[in-house]
């Protein structure tokens, strides 16, 4: 079965390019233990796409930090994720940010909405089988989604209590 990620990456269309990858506190702990440093993230103003009408309006308030900035993985000058190498992501799947583990599933706090239409997998008849082949079945995506919102909410509630 053809997995579109290979074609996508060769065409320069990988989902690791030109994104703001939001990090939870759990992501930071996991990644820092793996890479041996905490110098892999930065604070940035949100990109304009968060304000598009189709974007989940609850997302930005959930991830925004004091000073109206987001905590995201660093990117290079071309805006590609700094964890991206010629051979793909340098992080093993289970270490990656929850947002990356969830991609290409679309999600809100209520659950998984489907596969992102900008991802070629969504156009495949056998998209579910491809995602299973990538070891990303819907059942696992639901677990990552729950963990993501649990971590984001607990950090936000902790900040509000300070
Ligand atoms: S998940 Fe989708 S967008 Fe990302 S590399 Fe694979 S096919 Fe491309
Ligand atoms: S952490 Fe890995 S999977 Fe996530 S955007 Fe960066 S290179 Fe891609």
Image: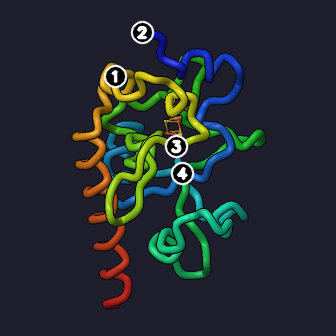
Residue sitting at the far front: 125
Residue 139 appears left or right of 157 = left
Determine if the C-beta at disc 4 is less than 8 A from ligand 2: yes
Would you name the residue on which mark 3 appears? 116
Nearest to the observer: residue 118 or residue 98: 118
SS under mark 3: loop
Look at 22% across and 40% down and name the residue there. 139
Marks 3 and 2, how far apart at CA = 20 Å
The quarter in which the N terminus is drawn is: top left
Residue under label 4: 21
Q: Are marks 2 and 1 in contact (CB under 8 Å)?
A: yes
Q: CA distance from mark 2 to mark 1?
A: 9 Å
- Sequence order check: which comes first, mark 4 or mark 1? 4
The label on residue 1 is: 2
Question: Which circle, 4 or 1, is nearer the viewer?
Answer: 1
Within 10 angstroms of label 2, few (less than 14), some, or many (20 or more) residues? few
Q: Secondary structure at mark 2?
A: loop
Seen from the viewer's position, the closer of residues 156 and 127 is 127
Quadrant housing residue 129: top left
Q: Quadrant of residue 96?
A: top left
Q: Is residue 50 left or right of residue 63?
A: right
Of the image marks 2 and 1, the number of the one nearer the N terminus: 2
Looking at the rendered image, the disc whose residue lies closer to the viewer, 4 or 3, is: 3
Position of the C terminus, as image quadrant, is bottom left
Q: Which residue is tagged 1?
A: 129
| First reached walking from the N terminus: tag 3 or tag 2 | 2
Q: Residue at x 41, y 22 (%)?
A: 126
Q: Is residue 2 visible?
A: yes
- Circle nearer the viewer, 4 or 2: 2
Earlier in the chain: of badge 4 and badge 3, it is 4
| CA gap, disc 3 and disc 1 | 16 Å
- Check mark 2 vs ligand 1: CB closer than 8 Å? yes or no: no
């Amino acid at each position: 079965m053809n997995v579109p990620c290979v074609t996508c990456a060769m065409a320069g269309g990988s989902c690791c390019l030109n994104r703001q990858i939001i990090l939870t506190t759990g992501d930071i702990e996991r990644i820092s233990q793996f890479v041996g440093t905490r110098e892999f993230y930065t604070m940035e103003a949100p990109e304009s796409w968060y304000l598009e009408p189709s974007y989940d309006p609850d997302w930005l308030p959930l991830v925004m930090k004091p000073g109206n900035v987001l905590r995201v993985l660093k990117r290079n000058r071309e805006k590609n994720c700094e964890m991206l190498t010629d051979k793909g992501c340098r992080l093993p799947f289970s270490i990656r940010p929850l947002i990356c583990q969830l991609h290409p599933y679309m999600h809100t706090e209520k659950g998984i909405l489907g596969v992102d239409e900008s991802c070629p997998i969504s156009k495949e008849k056998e998209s579910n089988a491809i995602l299973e082949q990538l070891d990303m079945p819907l059942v696992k995506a639901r677990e990552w989604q729950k963990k993501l919102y649990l971590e984001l909410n607990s950090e936000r509630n902790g900040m509000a209590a300070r």
